[in-house]
Every structure is written in C-alpha cells, then in structure tokens.
Image (spheres, rainbow, N blue to C red):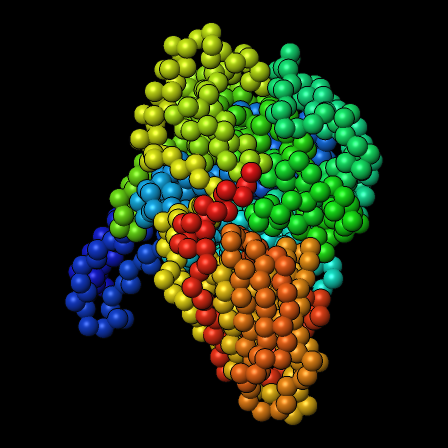
Amino acid sequence: MSRWTACGRACIYAIGVLMMVGAENVPAAERLDRTVLPIRQPKLPAITALDARNVAAPPRFEISAPRGAPNVLILLIDDLGFGMSSVFGGPIRMPTAERLAANGLRYNHFHTTALCSPTRTALLSGRNHHMNNMGGITEIATAFPGNTGQRPNEVAPLAEMLRLNGYSTGFFGKNHETATWEVSPSGPTDRWPTRSGFDKFYGFIGGETNQWSPLVYDGLTQVELPQDSNYHFMNDMTNQAIHWMRSQKSLTPDKPFFIYFAPGATHAPHHVPKEWIAKYKGQFDGGWDRFREETLARQIKLGVVPEGTALAPKPEAIKDWDKLTADERKLFTRQMEIFAGFGEYTDSEIGRLLRALEETGQMNDTLIFYILGDNGTSAEGGPNGLFNEYTYFNHVPESVESILQHFDELGGPMSYNHMAAGWAVAGDTPFAWTKQVASNFGGTRNGLVIHWPKGISSRGELRSQFHHVIDVTPTVLEAAKLPEPKVVNGSKQEPIEGVSMVYSFEDANAKGRHHVQYFEIMGNRGIYADGWLAGTVHRAPWEYEPRRTLVDDKWELYDARTDFSLVNDLAGKNPAKLKQLQDLFLKEAVKYRVLPIDDRLLERLNPATAGRPDLMAGRTSLTVYEGMKGMSENVFINTKNRSHSITASVEIPEGGADGVLLAQAGRFGGWSLYMKDGKPTYTYNFVGLQRFTVSSPEPLAAGTATVRYEFDYDGGGPGKGGTGRLLVNGKPVAQGRIDHTQCCVFSADEGADVGMDDGTPVSEDYKAGDNAFTGKIQRITIELAQQKLGTAAEEASGVVRRAD
C-alpha cells in the first residue's frame, strides 16, 4: 500500500485545512474573514487514523496581521492647545514633533472633543464620545445613555480589533476611560486596559497623577515605586514602553505592534525637573498678549494658519497683561515657564522612544500619530493659577499673594500646581477659548502630525481637510488592510463613525470626507457642517454656574472656510443658516445619544445626585484590614461634611509602635490616623494649606488596644469645621479644633491606605515610603453619623450655592 493510500482521509483532511486557511502562495492572513472577531478557527473533519505516525498533522491555526500591516504608534499629549507647540507656531520647543513633521504631514484642521475621557474613548474606538457613553470625564458619569461612563460592548476599542488581528498591543500612560466605581479589587475589570485589547498596560487609571509620586498599575497590579528623589513618571513610562517594544520585536520580529503612548503631561499638576524650567527663564516676561501676537505671526509664517488670520478676542474674564500688578506678572511668568518646560521635557522623552524605534529598525514602517493635545489648553487654573489644584474642586480661593509664598516650590514635589487661565487662552492661539469649550475651535482644534515613511511619500506638507479624533481608528484599519469588524466577542458592533484620512496622505487638495461633526461637553455645544460652525458657550471653564438655561443660550455662527480663527459672528446676518445648523445639531444629538444634555457640574461629582453606581451607597460603616491600599474616593466611604468615627483595633508590641493606621489621600489634602512616638495622633490636611492635629499626650502601652477618633461636624453647609477627639480604650485622651474641611474632593489618584500612607504623606510627621505601622492592625471601622446637612442631594446643591 502506498504512503498516499495509507494516508487516506487524513491527507484529505490536511489538504482541506490548507484550502481553508490559504495555500502556500496565498497567505492565510489574506483569506480570513476578519469582520467577525475573534477570527473563527476552521472547523476540521474528525481524524480516524489510529497511529499519529501514519497521518500528517494539520497546520497550526494562528492569526497573523495582513501582509504589509505597519506598526502603529499613537502619541497623545494632554491639555496642550493648538498654539503651544513649536511645530504649530507655539513657543514650546518640541524638536521631536518638528522632525516628524518635516518627514511627514501636519494637519491643521484636526479636532478633539474638548475634554479628556471623551477624546480618549473616541480616539480608540472610531465612534463619537457619547456612543462610548463618555459624554464627560469618568468622574461625572450619570445614569443617562451617552453619559454612563461605561463603554458598551457594541463599541469595541481599536486595541481589541488589532489584537484579534495579530498585533501585539501596549499602553503606557494615562487611561481615564475606566468607570470610577470599577477601580477597586472588586472590579469588574472589563474596561481596564488589559481587558480592553491591550496585552500590556503600565500607567495610571484616573484623569491625572502626581508625576513625582504617581499611583501606577502594571496590568491590574499596583506598582511599588522606587524611593528615588529623581523619579519622574514621564521618564518611567518611557523606559517601560522602550523595554516592551524591544522585547516584542526581539521575540516576534514579524509581528506588528500597536503602542498607545499617552503621557499625563501636560495636564496639571505641572511637575517637571528644574533644569527644564530653567530653559525658559525670562522667555514669557512679555505676557500672554504678546505671546498671542508672536505665536500668530509664527503660525502664519509656517503656513499652519492662513495669511490674514486675525486674533480672536480674549474672553472678558482674561485681563490685559499691561494692567497686571508686578506680583501677578512675576507669578504668572513663572507658571508659563514651568508649563513650557513640562512640554519640552515630554517631547524629549518621546524622542527617546523614537530613537529606540530607529535602533530596532522599526521607524520606517511605523505609522505614527503625534496628537498635540486631547483638547485645548486647560483654563481650570482660573484667574490666578493654583498652588494646589484641589483648591479648585473644593471652592477654596487662592490669591496671588498666597501662591507666591510657594513660588520656589512650583513645579516640584511639594506643589500640585496649575497656571492662570490667561496662558490657556494664549496657548490656544489664534482662537478665543480653551479646554471644556466644545463650541469653539480653541477647545477642540489640536495639531496633528502623521509620519509613516514606508506608507507616505509626501514630506513636510500641510493637510487642511477637516478631521476629528474619531477618524484615527478607521485610518489605522485602512493602513493595516483590515476591514471594519461587524461582530467583536459576540457583540454586534455599532458602525464606525469616523472616516479614514488615508485619502489625504498623498493629495493635499483632496476633497475632505468628514462633512458633519457635533460637539458637546456639559452644555457647551456646537455643530460643524461643510465649513460652517455654529455653537454656544454655555459655561466658561472657570465658572461654576451656566451663563443661561439651555433653551436661552446665545448661539454664534461662523464661516470657518474664510474665518480660520472664528472672529466674525454671522448669527445676526444669517439667521436662516444658524437655524439650519441648530436643527442639524439636534438631529445629530438624538442620533448619537447626546440628549438629554446635563449641564450640572459639582452635582455630577456626587454619585447620589449624578445617578451613577456607588459601592458605598446606603452604607454608614466600612471595616477595612491591614494591607488594603489605593482605595480611591469613588470606592471608599465618604466622611466629608458629616460627623463620623474611626475605630482601630491594634496590637502594640513591647517598646511601642509607630506608623500609619489609616490614611486617605496625601500631601495636598486628606487625613491620617497614626502613631507618633507611640502616641495616637490624627491630622487633617486642608488642601495642603493648613494642617490640624489632635494628639494623645501619652504613648500606648504594649498589648491590645482600641484607638478611636471621633469628629463632631459643625454642620450648616459643606466644607465646615468641627471638633476632633481621640479616645484610647474608651477613655478620652485629646481634643482639638479642625477649622476647615474639604467639601468635595481629596485626590484624583491618592486613595485610602490601611497600615501605611502610600504616595505622598498627609502629615510631615512621617516620611513617604517609610511609615508602615510597626504593630499589628486587627481591623479598622469607619462609621458615619446622621448627616446634619440632610440628603446627599441637598449637600451637593449646597456646594453649588457656595460657588458664587
């Protein structure tokens, strides 16, 4: 019997497999149905042969990317406006971006959503932000579709599309796409990066982090950072990205990668090494008005804005530079020097990553998107800027005089700083507005550089077709020769709403394909349609209350085809066109789940009034145990604005014990119950500006003990003071006054820790990284007393009433 005859059905089986997955001259990757993900494994006939030696094994079923699919690198800078970077005429030197632009393409009509989380979900899905249920940042999610803060399964992220098509996927930096109540050991972790298509994640989950002392996760595990005075997260995340990329290419050189590199820079806090700040000393002494004029001149010279473009007028709240006091000028100049240093430092670190690409031979075939901002520059620093950004969220005003007391600390680890709104307006030159203002290009227009030597022959050219951040995903899919998936992980997909930009790569004069785009962030809303823009400024970033009701908003109308900077409002001259666009906005708003519009601000920080899930909803007590740490405010019991107690059952060894029993947040606001020199002590840190301490005069004796802290809140509104008492084994040992408390927010990244104070210290009585409790904690229970403010809704409304 011949070998072929003996093979029989087994050989037919193997031939069938080859036919299904592709013969030798037709790569299997090109014969697969990629519209349903995961790609289905071919169904093979049963094998009847008894002896494996008498049958040919079927080829292994593996998914590989289409032939010629490039590596993809998306670089996303945070809070950097159109007029900040040198590559688009700004004063911040960004040589890495300039080099990419010189060998690639600049897009000067590229748009974001005007806010962090919405831009990021839209970028990584190709669908509008409300279709991602991300109408605002995750911290202000509500119960309404479009704003729930949870990306639906019907909107698969780009990383998942690429991973299931044979890419390695890595994410480094800022996430801000995971629902706040899902960031705990209880999960669910479905929307964490490593379950959203990324093989690797190294970064932080929330909207911002302390760059000197960040809360970092590697996958789902919190990272123990080195106690290094030179540590900075920007450097760390770059090292991690380089290491991952090199390892990936070493082990699987033919497998393309997708890297999403999203620094926390240049979002507040503006933390940067001193040597980078020094590079800009004196360069902004002319102020923000001269900054705008000089930037516009450079923009025109570069060609990134047309000849004849005029500066849009500043918002009325922004003072003229020549009317400021000497102290104001001194402070504000320093703020911009810090921000500029932060921007250049970030670009330098990105340069290190790109050099690593070159060294590994990947630069030529890596499709790079360098997106210079996820929205306009942030004006949330208000008129004076901030020593501590958390004062903004707690309605604690900071005067120029008070910030100047910390002048030398700004930018360093002892500050949590932000800059004045005047610089934000300047950084969005030539436009009038900033981050959050979705109705104006100052809030939504960001510079984009695309670089792909192997795929784009054009060099150093400008592209002026209107595009939006939702266009990046379809661009990647087309460049990688991948179809839009119709089903992903069993869920039928919402159609991709962006359009590919590939058509523009080789044709500067190609007609734009993105014709209509709505914008909406907390009531600021607009609509673009074939060169026309209509919109309304419902609330400025530094305002706590809307200017008008939604129905009474004043709309503006611009012909953006001839009015690049939006200076000629045509609403009065062309009411018919305005009405047409307003009607179109409502049509798009219904289509994309924008309605109902929720213009509340501080109420949306409160889960009860916002209507989103709350792990602590209805609970008046929480018991925690040693080793629990990093519990954010969104998953920890809320002691703000009410009387409460903290009871710790501990064991004290011979010789006494020191260290932290329970702490929430850190140096820039929070509280800590700890032992100092063996004595029970409680410190309340009021937004990093004042500390109130209650301490026992005597140390605890060896043995078991109960340490209890009681706080009797004054009531009468949010953010009031109260009386703190310490008890040991039921006996009062100390009492003290706490004059002020924080009404609303402690920290975006530093959580509650049991048996330590991770991150920055609440109290300078102990050191960061060396404050673990040296005894044993059995349990700690936090109990809430009945609120004096009434309902949570009344509490939130009281906060808003204070805003004026």
Q: How far from the left and from the top, in percent, is residue 530? A: 43, 17
Nearest the eye: 731 or 136: 731
Question: Residue at coordinates 76% horizontally, 43% vertically from top-left?
Answer: 401
Q: How far from the left and from the top, in percent, is residue 91? A: 72, 31
Instruction: Answer whether residue 645 is visible to the viewer in this image.
Output: yes
User: For the C terminus, which image quadrant?
Assistant: top right
Residue 227 horizontal side relative to residue 565, left or right: right
Nearest the eye: 689 or 152: 689
User: For the N terminus, which image quadrant?
Assistant: bottom left
Q: How far from the left and from the top, in percent, is residue 556? A: 48, 18
Q: Is residue 275 above or below residue 754?
A: above
Question: Residue at coordinates 27% horizontally, 54% vertically from top-left?
Answer: 41
The residue at the far top in this view is 573
Instruction: Answer whether residue 777 is visible to the viewer in this image.
Output: no
Quarter of image, res 369: top right
Number of callouts in the render? 0
Question: Residue at coordinates 33% horizontally, 43% vertically from top-left?
Answer: 144
Question: Residue at coordinates 64% horizontally, 65% vertically from top-left?
Answer: 737
Q: Is residue 489 above or below residue 757?
A: above
Nearest the eye: 571 or 561: 571
Residue 639 horizontal side relative to residue 225, left or right: left
Nearest the eye: 744 or 416: 744
Q: How far from the left and from the top, in percent, is residue 402? A: 74, 47
